[in-house]
Image (cartoon, helix red, strand yellow):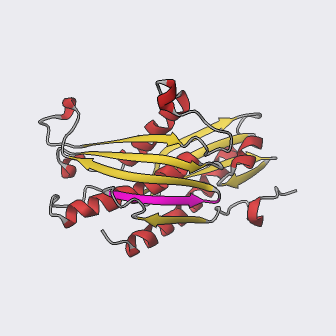
Amino acid sequence: MSVERSSGRGPAELRPTTIEANFVRTATGSALISAGETRVICTASIVDSVPKWLAGTGRGWLTAEYGMLPASTGERKQRDVARGRPDGRTVEIQRLIGRSLRGVVDFGALGERSIYVDCDVLQADGGTRCAAITGGFVALELATRRLLAERALARTPLTGSIAAVSCGVVAGEPLLDLDYREDSAAEVDGNVVMTGEGGLVEVQATAERTPLSRAHLDDLLVLAADGIAALRDVQEQVLAAATP
């Protein structure tokens, strides 16, 4: 018996996904990504300096920060600043976003500049880290386009594209792009980050209730590859229509 999903979508279907480019006028590059009921604002800011350990190397850097607005989950979430430090989940997610985006950046071409990609969750219904990576790449490309238009860069520092999607096993069935209800009931939940050329950047998979079989892992990777190809189409359409 197949799992009944939101919007009547099939096991291999993404939630309706849209990206609005240049959502934040004051950012160097920005995007608002919506995946079903999940919405994340992604901004990319570029500064003409690098961490001390990179000074004088001619190479740049990229880092990411992630946060959930207090009302993003319905029940108010305390801000990290009120606690004095980010929680473990926040730190893990922003490290994942940074690692993923750094995988498609040529830091020699960037020069001694730092890119800060900030991902703020307006509304959470599952898959926020994947939406942040997918939308974060659009913000990153728009920011680098601006530097190219201003002749601050001789060539693009981007070596490819990147996107991410969640997947999991619910009631014994592999599913793509889990919403919160599905994720809460999953025997296995995972996140897959891939380049536009199909290279795996990171695979996270956790067996919540039953061990993950090799066959199910292969099924999830196939679902993720198809889903990321569809997300890349969305990214390309948005970037083709966007003005710097």
Q: Residue at x 82, y 58 (%)?
A: 4
* Location of residue 147 with respect to 105 vertically, above or below: below
Q: Residue 123: x, y in percent?
A: 60, 50
- Residue at the far left in the pictured view: 56
> Would residue 5 appear left or right of 232 to someone viewing this image?
right
Tally of marks: 0
Residue, x 21% and y 50% (percent of image)? 110
Vertical arrangement, residue 179 with respect to residue 67, above or below: below
Question: Horizontal and vertical percent for residue 88?
Answer: 53, 28
Which quadrant holds residue 223?
bottom right
Whether residue 192 is visible here, answered yes or no, is no
Nearest the camera: 243 or 92?
243
Q: Main secondary structure of the magenta part?
A: strand
Q: Is residue 101 left or right of residue 206?
A: left
Q: Position of residue 112 (x, y in %)?
A: 17, 44
Magenta segment boundaries in residue numbering: 29-36
Residue 166 seen anywhere in this rendered image of the structure: yes
Queried whether the magenta region covers residue 35, the answer comes back as: yes
Give the vertical position of 84 relative to 227 (above or below): above
**Residue 208 image point, x, y percent:** 72, 34
Whether 32 is among the magenta residues is yes
| Residue lying at the far right of the rendered structure | 1
Q: Is residue 45 left or right of residue 220?
A: left
Q: Which residue is at 54% across, 43% downward? A: 69
- Give the position of the C terminus as an image quadrant: bottom left
User: Residue furthest toward the bottom?
Assistant: 241
* Residue at left offset 46%, top offset 47%: 119
- Quadrant of the frame with the N terminus: bottom right
